[in-house]
Amino acid sequence: MELKAMFPNLNVMWTRWSDYEVTTFDHVEYLVPAEKATPLAYDCAEQAEQLVADALELGRQLRMGTPDKNRLCAAFAARHGLLGLAGVNASIWQGLAGGGPLSASLDSRQYGEPVDELNREFQKLYYHFLYTREDVLPPEAPAVLLDLDGALHYRLTGGLVPQLIWEAHSMYEVLRLSYAMLMTQEKPSLKVCKNCGKVYYNTHAKSEFCGTKCRNYYNVKVFRTKSK
Ligand SMILES: [Zn+2]
């Protein structure tokens, strides 16, 4: 089931900035909106499936140890916004938050999230995904069993036609629950490209490639191998 099927009125307003950069506060690196960036408020649940695929692909690249990790996280944030970690994980942040970017209000230019924590979150999601595909964890994966959990705030409206409304507070919650729903669907829609290994979202059962370029490239490769 997809998020919008379960919660038809779902609308989670979120702020994304046009550009992000890394800054240091109290010896910790944070991803924050760049100086001249402009804000855009949008519904981050509108394309929750794309959000999940982008987060998994980022987790995959971070896991491979890309030297570009800050740039990739900034590009993700410019596309979707920061996760909203300060709101969901308050207990962890107490030591970090004193006057730093995490203690600013979520939609402000001052708000930022620690680069290391973002890395951990994206990789954790990707490890879970990997585990469902291979049933074996790579040795560097976190030692804890890879269950993901979260709390769900909902409201059932009164009146003749009660409606179930999910009161999501952050993009992080949207990402996690949307991922959970996609992973428990009968037909898998989160796929891994047969050519380049990229994680992408496609509901067609037969889809095997992230795009036509990869499909063509792969077919040429197979053809050449056969004709040798
Ligand atoms: Zn591909």
Image (cartoon, helix red, strand yellow):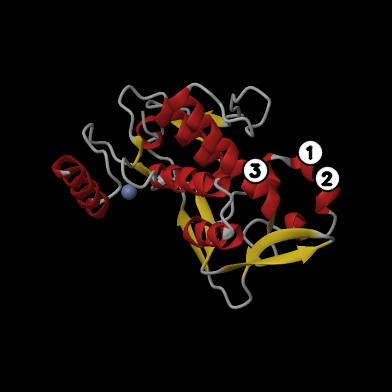
What is the quadrant of the C terminus in the image?
A: top left
In depth, the one of 173 and 141 nearer the eye is 141
Mark 2 and mark 1: Cα distance apart in space? 6 Å
Q: Which mark is residue 216?
A: none
Q: Who comes first in sequence, dot 2 or dot 3? A: 2
Mark 2 and mark 3: Cα distance apart in space? 18 Å
Q: Who comes first in sequence, dot 3 or dot 1? A: 1
Q: Position of residue 215 (x, y in %)?
A: 22, 48
Q: Amino acid at mark 1?
A: Ser
In depth, the one of 146 and 175 nearer the eye is 146
Residues packed near mark 1 inside 10 Å, few (<14), some (14 to 19) or many (20 plus): few
Horizontally, residue 218 falls left or right of residue 128, namely left
Residues packed near mark 3 inside 10 Å, few (<14), some (14 to 19) or many (20 plus): some
Q: Badge 3 is on which residue?
A: 120
Q: Secondary structure at mark 2?
A: helix
Verify CB contact (< 8 Å) between mark 3 and mark 1: no
Q: Which mark is residue 91?
A: 1
Q: Badge 2 is on which residue?
A: 94
Verify CB contact (< 8 Å) between mark 2 and mark 1: yes
Q: Secondary structure at mark 1?
A: helix
Q: Residue 115 falls in which quadrant of the image?
A: bottom right
Is 117 above or below relative to 20? above
Say which residue appears at 51% left-offset and 41% top-offset.
Answer: 175
Q: Residue 195 falls in which quadrant of the image?
A: top left
What is the quadrant of the N terminus in the image?
A: top left
Q: Amino acid at mark 3?
A: Arg
Q: Position of residue 222 (x, y in %)?
A: 21, 42
Verify CB contact (< 8 Å) between mark 2 and mark 3: no
